Image (cartoon, rainbow, N blue to C red):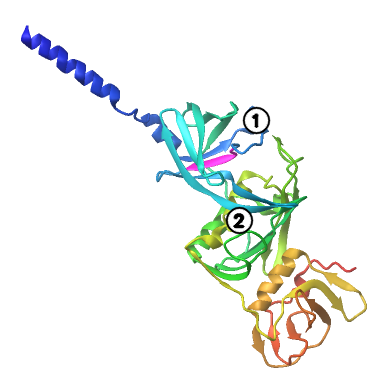
Amino acid sequence: MGLKILFIIISYFAILFMGCKPKSIDTNVESFIFGEWKLDYSSHTVHKTDSTIFNIIFKEDKKCNIYPSFYSFVFEDPRTFITYLGSNTDYKIEAKLLKIYNLARKNWDQFKIMKLTSDTLIIETSLKELLKFKKVNKKEKFQNNIDAIVLNTSGLYNYHSNYKIYLDKSGEMLIELNGYDDLYGTQSCILDKRVADSIFSLFEYNRISDLKSHYNSLTDSNLLQDEPKQKITLAFFSENRITKEIDIIDDSVPIDLYMAYDPIRTIYKSKNCHCKTTKIRNDMVTLGNEIETSDEQGYIKLSNSELFYLNFKILTAKEIEGSIQHKYKIKGSYSDLFTFSDGRFIRIEGSEKIYDVGYWFIDSTKINYY
């Protein structure tokens, strides 16, 4: 009888101990969650909110990449300054809850896992909205001849988000920041070549030539949202010439394009990128976008992307011996000094030094006289 009572007591405490153990994560969740998931737009129209996710990549180190990425907004009447925070954040799974750390609000967003299989993920937001994702197993790659990329932003309405970034395949960068950020002004940067290669490889999942020239969030997606906040211009260069220029409102582009240009916006903050304030030589100026011709054809106007690309080349131009023909006259962007050029070689007003930009920049522009 005593042994029977002892057995009952041991069994009771064993059950009690097991009941107090924290719930373990379903092994299927662990095995199925890793990888890339894309929002299934065909299932419903999405109302764009702070918790909307278009695409998510789960990694085995409890890190994930969320698209759209995180922004912070600082209001200073009458403008709101936008700071881009990136897409890389932490996640964790507790029972049937998916928790993703919100870099903007500095807290955990919670999503209830409604369904998870090898090819389907359905989660419920805090607003009781269901988001259905399909697993991305294989992507088609395309051959794009891209040597450099220029990305610049401008705020819309009362939003302020103005910066420009040049990045080429060698990892050289030029950044111009005009808002809230860790860095301010014009910065010259060197990005680790392996990181630069990985960014350019992301564009291989897009056929650049087939992309539209304009993407508007109010007309080019099945998302319902408020007024637009910022415009991005993305320009691709090959052999010193623009091959494609795209205007984008509020990141309303195909998700593979978004995932490709998204890292460029914060890569200068990473440990793989080394920046320093650009010091312009006394005999050198950055140029404005109006080029006066000497043949009475008027003015040539460069696009903002062409101008930023040209100014990067000017800042790295090499001094040479010789003279040049003054076919073009260009006013400085922050100076009253003029630059004289034959379309490749330049001389700054008041200096006898000649510099080689490295390419015939007039021939490479989309000639637009006015």
Name, please, the residue furthest toward the right.
296
Of 5 and 320, nearer the camera is 5
Q: Name the magenta segment's main secondary structure.
A: strand
Dividing the image into 4 quarters, which one contains the C terminus? bottom right
- The residue that appears at 74% across and 49% down in the rendered structure is 212
- The residue that appears at 68% across and 77% down in the rendered structure is 314
Q: Position of residue 357 (x, y in %)?
A: 69, 79
Q: Amino acid at mark 2?
A: Gln
- The residue that appears at 63% across and 62% down in the rendered structure is 146
Check the image and report above or below for 356 versus 95: below
Q: Which mark is residue 284?
A: none
Disc 2 is placed on an element classified as: loop
Of 166 and 129, nearer the camera is 129
Disc 1 residue crowd, few under 14, some 14–19, many 20+, Cα 10 Å: few
Q: Earlier in the sequence, mark 1 or mark 2?
A: 1
Dividing the image into 4 quarters, which one contains the N terminus? top left
Of 275 and 362, nearer the camera is 275
Q: Amino acid at mark 1?
A: Ser
Name, please, the residue furthest toward the front.
77
Q: Magenta residues, as a range?
A: 53-58
Residue 239 located left or right of residue 328: left
Q: Which mark is residue 42?
A: 1
Residue 331 located left or right of residue 123: right
- Cβ–Cβ below 8 Å for labels 1 and 2? no
Q: Is residue 117 visible?
A: yes
- The residue that appears at 55% across and 57% down in the rendered structure is 199
Q: Position of residue 19 (x, y in %)?
A: 29, 22
Q: Which residue is mark 2?
A: 143
- Quarter of the view holding residue 160: bottom right
Q: How far apart are labels 1 and 2 at the CA level?
A: 29 Å
Disc 2 residue crowd, few under 14, some 14–19, many 20+, Cα 10 Å: few
Of 226 and 349, nearer the camera is 226
